Amino acid sequence: MYAGDHDMERAVAELAGLLPAPLRPLARVAYNYRWSWTADGAAMFETIDPERWARTGHNPRRLLTETHHSMLERAAEDTSFVGWVERLAAELAADRARASLDGPIRPEHPVAFLCCEFGVHGSLPIYAGGLGVLAGDMLKEAADLALPMVGVGLMYRTGYFHQRIDITGFQHEYWLDVDPERLPCVKVTGADGRPVSVSVPIGNENVTAHVWRVDVGRVPLYLLDTDLPENSQLGRWITSRLYESNRAIRLAQYAMLGVGGVRALRALGLAPCVYHLNEGHPALGVFELLAQVQAQTPTGLETEAAWQQVRDQVVFTTHTPVPAGNETYERSEVLAMLGRIADVVSDRERFLAMGRIDPGNPAQPTGMTALALRASRQANAVSQRHGQVARAMWQPLFPGRAVEAVPISHITNGVHVPTWLQGPMRELLNRHLGEGWLSRADQPATWAPVRDIPASELWATRGAARRQLVDMIARRATSDRLSRSEPLDYAVAGGGFDPERLTIGFARRLATYKRLHLVALLPERALALIGGAQPVQFVFAGKAHPDDIAAKDVVRQVFALKRSPGVAGRAAFLEDYDIPLAGQLVAGCDVWINLPRPPNEASGTSGMKSCLGGGLQLSVLDGWWAEAYDGSNGWAINGDVDADTPAQDQRDARALFDLLEHEVLPMFHERDLEGVPQRWVAMMRRSLLTNGPRFSATRMLRDYVDRLYRCD
Ligand SMILES: *Cc1c(COP(=O)(O)O)cnc(C)c1O
């Protein structure tokens, strides 16, 4: 039904041919990431060869081709295991056989979801952070809801960087090759058996791309790849690195994603009913849509009517107010890379003007966000507060309109519950919330039984989740320290994390506005908490963009405290933050901290994931927390905007430690006769009941369908 079906069939048959007959149904399961969010898909692959499963980064295609044949034979002889395989294969088949969600969005006219990164799974390293993870969650949720959607992105051949911290706390970056031939994906070929290809005029070159397909449940994700011998070395580099440092190459990437992406959809036989530009990176696609409209009109002119036809097909989501996410380019930069794209549809001045705040001012630079806002029929921000911020920020684009009338609404983000609800908490909720509850995760009534889960059971589950996390921290902290040649006593002290201690987490991209540095701003108070009679333990993780020198320096500030007494076994910075690490941290931490400088946090999603694990939020009232906090479901730090940032940092750091010392720590240790902290558990309940349904991707995607994806 979708382009690449026969390629997928061939790949599945090839892989099945390598397996003992009883295990052949596994091949199909391996080629669809749906296994990763079902209850026991990962467990099934792990059972075959736990060590190989870990070594392959939980990549089932590699597991099945690299595991020794004797392991496969042994699994094939185990009838209960074979039954397990057959059940998962049958579930996948049944899921794919379901009818699509009723409505005007149909498989041949799907929603085309374009994004520069997709965080589907740790084994598919084409994501950097929250934007990509959200995009992955959107695809998974569309698959679960049977909403016809296809994803379009780039197959980065070295992905995002990996992080190594040296002994001084300095971040180093390295890149690893991503080999599509070993990922659960296929190259899409046409009826002639040759790879489907598109070509985009970039700079002086016509750059060619092939298309890979990755299956995310019922949703195909198409990824463009320019690493082909027919391209120049520069052309090949376009799909090398996510968030490439070179500005000119970034522009080339946007052209490939936008123009190439829209062309690829056509080449794949799809006529989307709506194009969703998820953040500004794919916005150049609107010029390709314009060209398609022009090709159908006798005059072929760039008229207002033609633009209106483009706008009718396009919606746009803005994801951040910070400048790095809303880059602009000078005319010479734009024309050097994109001049020939401009020539096809328009004249160069008008092309540049589409991306200016004031189109009539030739001195202004050109940006993707302005282009996307101007060329879409509807736009949204990703939380209520971000809606207000975005309307004020982009008001100049709509002269004559009051800020409240700027046409940017909001749909608050949510997280894909079956992906992020893991471990003991998932088992607990499955026991209490009833058959099939995950498909009703957006309804408050679904979560109501949380009220009746005995406090002792909730607390025991929290303890089990914390224990799993502490085991992981102890292992990783020690090996991270050994690999940066720390003194041995300090390295092995990483094993000193305690499963009974209050465990506090902070992990996200290290942009300076996320303010990890606040935890190191009042070192004597941080050290007192760590070394007190009732010590707490901290776990940190996050990557700074290679060019963000200030953000990299924050890691150094945190590292400066590491040799203080008691710290070695009670605070750790874990290297190379990624989806698997995020999953473990949000499932295990008791308290999840978020300290953005308001109003820069558009939404934030890791806190939503932490809620699912029974974690409690301690956050600045910015992004999603500004609408989620109700006085009883977590803790809040004032979210007012203050132009005096050093003063605000001091004040917010004090507020953080005041809350930790006077509220969080005492509540954690206030136990009844059975050792249960009743007030703490009551807050966990409030958090699950209020945040669980509201910040699920089910609620989010239903909002997109109802309010943004109109297709009539
Ligand atoms: C959820 C997630 C993020 C986003 O976290 P924020 O709280 O929104 O900053 C970033 N990286 C990874 C790996 C994630 O899973």
Image: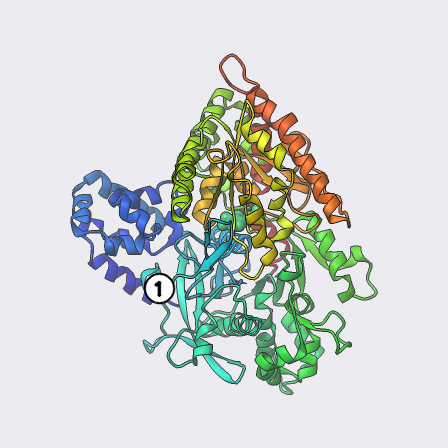
Count neighbours of disc 1 (C-alpha within 10 A) and say few if under 14, some if 14 to 19, many if 20 or more.
few
- Viewer-closest of 33 and 514: 514
- Viewer-closest of 480 and 33: 480
Rendering coords of residue 518 (x, y %) = 64, 42
**Total tally of numbered discs in the picture:** 1
Rendering coords of residue 410 (x, y %) = 67, 52
- Indicate the quadrant where residue 444 lies: top right
The amino acid sitting under disc 1 is Asp
| Viewport quadrant of the N terminus | bottom left
| Residue under numbered circle 1 | 179
- In this rendering, the answer to whether 287 lies above or below 679 is below
- Indicate the quadrant where residue 532 lies: top right
Q: Secondary structure at mark 1?
A: loop
- In this rendering, the answer to whether 695 lies above or below 434 is below
Residue 423 appears anywhere in the view: no
- Viewer-closest of 501 and 73: 501
- Residue drawn at x 62%, y 63% is 315
Rendering coords of residue 572 (x, y %) = 48, 40
Give the colour scheme shown.
Answer: rainbow
- Residue drawn at x 47%, y 57% is 172
Asked if ligand 1 lies within 8 A of label 1, the reply is no
Q: Most extreme residue toward the top, as rendered?
A: 673
Does 359 sit left or right of 29 as displayed?
Answer: right
Q: Most extreme residue toward the front, as rendered?
A: 487
Rendering coords of residue 88 (x, y %) = 32, 45
- Viewer-closest of 637 and 624: 637
| Viewport quadrant of the C terminus | bottom right
- Residue drawn at x 70%, y 52% is 387
- Indicate the quadrant where residue 321 lies: bottom right
- Residue drawn at x 57%, y 41% is 607
